Image: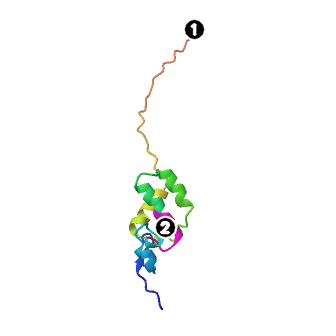
Amino acid sequence: MSEYLNATCAICGTKYHICNDCQNTRAFTPWRTIADSINCYKIYLILRDYTNGNSDAATTKEQLLMCDLSDVETFQDNIKVAIEKLMAPPKIRKKAVKKVESESKIEVEKNDE
């Protein structure tokens, strides 16, 4: 029997087959109902925790670095944008510095010889 592609990965958009057991489980959500691979599911969990406020940007970036992001260009647009934003170097905010010029007067003594 040929398996038909009845699911789409929430991360990379790849079509894959999900069995009836996983598809019909209601007591919990099997990872196969969300993603086509463990790597995509890890990325999903990391981004979900960040979006829900359970993780900060630095921690999320560290966790994403442990995942395979080699195909990030093929990910769903919203996922790709979120990852690129998190992985981008932090922006350095420049403060306006007021230039203070102090005039110091130097007194020079003249020796009249």
63 up-or-down from 99: above or below? below
Estimate the x, y position of residue 49 in percent, counting from the top left.
45, 56
What residue does disc 1 label?
Answer: 112
Q: Is residue 52 left or right of residue 40?
A: left
What residue does disc 2 label?
Answer: 41
Looking at the image, which is closer to me, 92 or 11? 11
Q: Is residue 79 visible?
A: yes
Q: Residue furthest right?
A: 113
28 up-or-down from 106: above or below? below
81 up-or-down from 108: above or below? below
Considering only order in the chain, which callout, 2 or 1, is on the residue closer to the N terminus? 2
Viewer-nearest of labels 1 and 2?
2
* Residue 101 painted magenta: no
Mark 2 is surrounded, within 10 Å at the Cα level, by few (under 14), some (14 to 19) or many (20 or more) other residues, namely: some
Looking at the image, which is closer to me, 8 or 27? 27
Residue for point 55% across, 60% down: 65
Q: What amino acid type should be assigned to the residue bearing mark 1?
A: Asp
- Secondary element at image label 2: helix
* Residue 39 painted magenta: yes
Looking at the image, which is closer to me, 108 or 83? 83
Q: Main secondary structure of the magenta part?
A: helix
Q: Residue furthest bottom?
A: 1
Estimate the x, y position of residue 76 in percent, counting from the top left.
41, 70
What's the magenta region? Answer: 34-44
